[in-house]
Image (tube, rainbow, N blue to C red):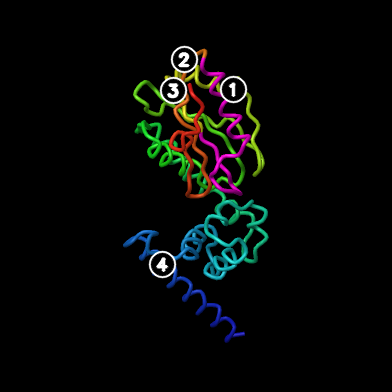
Amino acid sequence: MTDRKEKIQTGGLQHAGHRARLRQRFLEAGLDAFADHEVLEFALFHAVPRGDTNEIAHRLMARFGSLAAVFEAAPADLAAVEGMGPLSAAFLSFIPQLARRYLKDRVATEKPCLKTSEEAMAYAIPLMAGRADEVFYVVSLDAACRVVHAALLAQGTVAEVRLHPRQVVEVALRNRASSVLFVHNHPAGTARPSTDDLRLTETLVKALQPLSIKVLDHIVVAGDQAYSFARENVMPKN
């Protein structure tokens, strides 16, 4: 009994020391110095107060294949991994949503200017961080091409979203947009637009033309890649 108790105490001390060292590395150098499994391990410190989060992190990476895939996984799938549970699964699912909320707040404060396709793509990629399903945003811009508001208008499966032109018109009018930018993602594919994407863009452009609201670009995001209709010269005339 004594030997077992000493082993538990020793293991606890080792875990505590390892956590302290990893925490110090983060404070000194940030996450850039971390391997992907260490990012998960550090995150799990805050959801798993005791236990070997290093082993759990490795199991998560083995199960899902990448850091992004872990954060995009369904909570039920995360909870099924050995060492995980409903609370730790909810915490990991919370992280990408927190990142999106942070970026949304920064946009609301800073009002970035999106005059070029490069600026639009740089804005769009983090907007889709952690999205496992397909979503469609309408970004309203003022006369100087500054972001006024980004509205999530449609959310579907990994293969499709359903959107009515009336929804886009209502958002543009409500935000008094001088122009708009469309952003949607392909969670399970490449950033290249489908035939349906091209057809939908043309329909939405026509819906906004009577209001003299120009569609500057349509950005398709897949992971860290983005495709610009305007840059590739496939944007319908408007």
**Disc with the residue nearer the chain's start (4 vs 1):** 4
Q: Which residue is mark 4?
A: 22
Residue at disc 2, secondary structure: loop
Q: Position of residue 123 (x, y in %)?
A: 42, 39
**Disc with the residue nearer the chain's start (4 vs 2):** 4
Residue at disc 3, secondary structure: strand
Q: Looking at the image, which is closer to me, 232 or 179?
A: 232
Is 52 within the magenta?
no
- The answer to whether 19 is drawn above or below residue 237 in the figure is below
Q: Name the amino acid type tagged 2.
A: Ser
- The answer to whether 217 is drawn above or below residue 222 in the figure is above
**Horizontal side of residue 174 vs 25, given as left or right:** right
Mark 3–mark 4 distance (CA, rounded to whole Å): 47 Å
Q: Name the amino acid type tagged 1.
A: Gln
Q: Residues within 10 Å of mark 1 (few under 14, many from 20)?
A: few
Q: Name the amino acid type tagged 3.
A: Ser
**Disc with the residue nearer the chain's start (3 vs 4):** 4
Q: Which residue is mark 1?
A: 167
Q: Which residue is mark 3?
A: 179
Give the residue at x 40% y 29%.
147
Give the residue at x 37% y 34%.
116
Q: Are marks 4 and 2 in contact (CB under 8 Å)?
A: no
Residue at disc 4, secondary structure: helix
Q: Residues within 10 Å of mark 2 (few under 14, many from 20)?
A: few
Q: Residues within 10 Å of mark 3 (few under 14, many from 20)?
A: many
Q: Which residue is mark 2?
A: 212
**Disc with the residue nearer the chain's start (1 vs 2):** 1
Mark 1–mark 2 distance (CA, rounded to whole Å): 17 Å
| Mark in the foreground, 3 or 4 | 3
**Image: magenta residue range:** 183-209
Q: Position of residue 231 (x, y in %)?
A: 43, 37
